[in-house]
Each structure stands twice: as structure tokens, then as C-alpha cells.
Image (cartoon, rainbow, N blue to C red):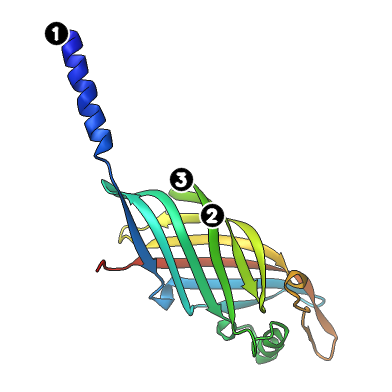
Amino acid sequence: MKKYLEGITLILMMIGISSIGYAQATYKIQDNNGVAMKLKGTSSLHDWEMNAHRAKEGEAQFIFNELNESELTSMKSLTFTLEVYALKGESKGLDNNAYKALRADKNKYISYKLTSATESAEKGGYLVKTKGKLTIAGVTNDIAMDIHLVVNKNKTVTLKGSYQLKMSDYKVEPPSFMMGMMTTGDIIKINFEVTYIKQNEG
């Protein structure tokens, strides 16, 4: 009898496990209040930064446990596109020199596309180790970047992270100001926080 009950329990457990499904959903950036990007750099006089609070577009696909929509299984895809002219600094002089250095007249957008991701749980959300392609000033490089992912109570998904790069890797000449008296460093740090909103199916 005991073995019979154990067998029934095992069968029920297997049925329960096999019935767990996974839901894939598409998310997009729709609310510019959910975009915060900051570029920070150095110069011969003082540190500088430029900020953007709107994006041209962004889309992601996440897979969740059907029984728990807050339980992330994987991040299948992710794109983000920012218009260079959306970046604003402390002065128009800084902005114009930055736009010129980034060749914004011919390459209007900074974009990122995910190529692979590995997810693991962390306090308050998930750590996603990603690889992707970052395009700046018309030059594309492969990058590896850690992203912190949080599933919010309203079912939106917020991604936070930072990445440090060299402008010279994108054939960008660090801009100078005040007739060359102020020169900027080659290294830029990008901090970002972007919220993606689930799209209605159908």
C-alpha cells in the first residue's frame, strides 16, 4: 500500500511539473519617462555629462513562468535606439561639439542589439550577463555588459546598468572646447535605466 501511494504521489508530481508552461511576451518602450541615460566623461578642466530622457525605440522579448508572471525564465531579445540629438549637456557648446564628434549629421542614432543573455536571480530581481552589438557614429562593436533586471508590480520590466567604452574604439575623436584649451578624455561611462512595457497580444 505504501509503495502504491508513493507511486501515485510520483505520478502527480510529474504531471504537475509537465504542466508548468512558459509565456513569451513582447515589451516596448512607450513612455519616455521610463528612459534615463547618462554619458559621463572627463576633461582637462572638469568632468562633464550629457543626459537623455527619451528614446527613438526599443523592444524586448521575455519569457516568464506561466504560473508566476514575475518569475523570469529568459531574455530572448533586446534592442534600444537613442537619437544622438536627444543627448543634452550643460551648454549648447558642449552639445554641438559632441554631435560633431559623433558625426550625428550622418549617423543620427546610437543603438544596441542583444546577441545572447544568461540570467540568474539576485536580490530584488535578476542579474543578466549579456553580449551584444553597440553602434556609435556608424561603427559597431561587440560588447559584454551586466544588466540588472527588475519585474515591477505593474508588470513592466526595468533594466539598469552601466558600460565603459573608449571613443577611439568607435573612431570618435574626443571633442575639444574653448579653442582647444579644454580637451576631453577618451573614456566615456554610460549609465542607463530603461523601462519596457508589455504589449497587448493580438
Q: Which residue is drawn at 59% across and 82% down?
A: 84
Query: On the rendered image, what quadrant is the N terminus found in?
Result: top left
Residue 58: x, y in percent?
46, 72
Residue 131: x, y in percent?
59, 56
**Above-or-below relation of 82 to 130:** below
Q: Is residue 157 visible?
A: yes
**Residue placed under numbered mark 2 in the picture:** 116
- Distance in Å between CA atoms under marks 2 and 1: 50 Å
Q: What residue type is labelled 2?
A: Ser
Q: Can residue 54 be seen in this view?
A: no
- Distance in Å between CA atoms under marks 2 and 3: 22 Å
The residue most toward the top is: 1
Q: Which residue is drawn at 84% across and 91% down?
A: 179
Position of 71 with respect to 79 (left or right) is: left
Residue 123, numbered label: 3
Q: Residue at x 33, y 60 (%)?
A: 25
Position of 166 with respect to 9 (left or right) is: right
Foreground mark, 2 or 3, reads: 2
Query: On the rendered image, what quadrant is the C terminus found in?
Result: bottom left
Q: In which quarter of the image is residue 168?
A: bottom right
**Residue placed under numbered mark 1 in the picture:** 1
Q: Which amino acid does label 3 sit on?
A: Lys
Mark 2 or mark 3, earlier in chain: 2
